[in-house]
Amino acid sequence: MEQSQPLLKTLMLILIVVLLILISPKGGTYFYVHNIRWIYVFIMATGFSLFLIPIVKYLAVKFRIMDFPAERKIHRKPIPLLGGLAIYIALVLTIIRNLNFNPELKGIVIGGAIIFILGLVDDIWGLSARYKLVGQIAATLVIIRYGVVITVIPHWPGEHIIEILLTIIGVVGVINAFNYFDGMDGLAAGLGIISSFCFFIFALQTGQRYLAWLAIALLGACMGFLPYNWKPAQLFLGDSGSNFIGFNLAALAIMGSWKVENPLVACVVPVLILSVYIFDMIYTTVSRIKNKRVHNVKEWLEYTGKDHLHHRLVKLGMSEVGTVLIICALSLTLGIGAIVLRGAGAFESVFLFIQAVLIFLIIVVLMLTGREIR
């Protein structure tokens, strides 16, 4: 990482110059005219992120907002813990500067602010699981108010209540599932990039411009952060970053129109893109309940252990970098399957879903093997 510093600084300087051009009053005209606004958004988000990261790193060290080594943690020295602040500011500034909003996007920005502030408070002073859960539910209710809600339920009695409950469960679940993967250098940021990329490609193909702008902005913000988070990490996301990214990924999954005429495809597409997080959360939850390590929601939120997919792969003898690359490749593979579903019918979607299940059955065997290795 030391040898890459000059290149990284040069790249950052170039992007900052480009960024200054883009944020000028007429900076986005060319991209508007040529219908490639997403490039404009991506460059802004990446540039803002790269520009802000050295600043937040300095602030974290100055005010000792650090992640200190502990028994359950991998790193052996204190690491600055404000990477999430750079990602949050970069994404919000990009969305605001883009000057294109719809109600759903506004709701996601407001809800994301709640999630980020809760995470920042937790990073600095600590926050109980109860308050985290209440805050996550509150943020979800905000996006529901702005129209970001699961709508695949048939016309049953009480369908709206069911949809609201499913949305709350889905968003809170993805936030915490994504947070579980913030335990290895580069893993959470890498997965955030891949999931955002898959959502972006699907949005671009289907003409969902607001979905595409949010996805590419999140991708750019994570991209600017990744060089500083790759092993050996100089900066961590913190809960403010991992929860914020997880919230936005959940919002992207719900906000998108995947295939209105085929509810099965509409369900399978976002599930496949987020399937690595969903699988890990379900597997570890079932394992912890079975082994009587957790007994209620509070204990589930607070439990921290080395029983996640990345921990198990390391126990099998893989390096940390190798583990990160394997999990990211798995996520990309399943995401590509989701993108292919755009032109598929119910028959093909069932087989792609079965394929994903078989892949995860293989992963279960690996995780069980990893559990036996001490």
Image (cartoon, rainbow, N blue to C red):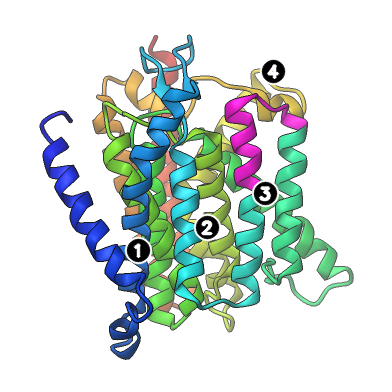
Residue 120 among those drawn in magenta: yes
Circle 4 sits on which residue?
292
Residue ID for mark 1: 44
Indicate which disc residue 271 carries: 2
Which mark's residue is nearer the viewer, 3 or 1? 1
Which image quadrant: the C terminus? top left
Residue 114: numbered disc: 3
What amino acid is found at the position of numbered circle 1 in the picture?
Answer: Met
The answer to the question of whether label 2 and label 4 lie on touching residues, with beta carbons closer than 8 A, is: no
Q: What residue appears at the point 45 percent right and 28 percent down from the top-left corner?
A: 60
At mark 4, the secondary structure is: loop
Check the image and report above or below for 181 versus 328. above
* Magenta run includes residue 236: no
In the image, taking residue 108 as reference, residue 34 lies left or right, namely left
Sequence-wise, the earlier of marks 4 and 1 is: 1
State left or right for residue 199 relative to residue 180: left
Disc 1 on helix, strand or loop? helix
Q: Nearer the viewer, residue 336 or 24?
A: 24
Residue drawn at the location 76% of the way across and 67% of the way down: 145
Label 4 to label 3: alpha-carbon separation:
33 Å
Query: Amino acid type of disc 3?
Result: Ile
Image x and y of residue 305, in percent: 54, 19
Q: Considering only order in the chain, which callout, 1 or 2, is on the residue closer to the N terminus? A: 1
Q: Secondary structure at mark 2?
A: helix
Q: How many marks?
A: 4
| Residues packed near mark 4 inside 10 Å, few (<14), some (14 to 19) or many (20 plus) | few
- The chief SS type of the magenta part is helix
Which residue lies at the image location 44% right of the left edge and 72% below the top edge? 212
Mark 2 and 1 residues: CB-CB less than 8 Å, in contact? no
Disc on the earlier residue, 2 or 3: 3
Q: Residues within 10 Å of mark 1 (few under 14, many from 20)?
A: many
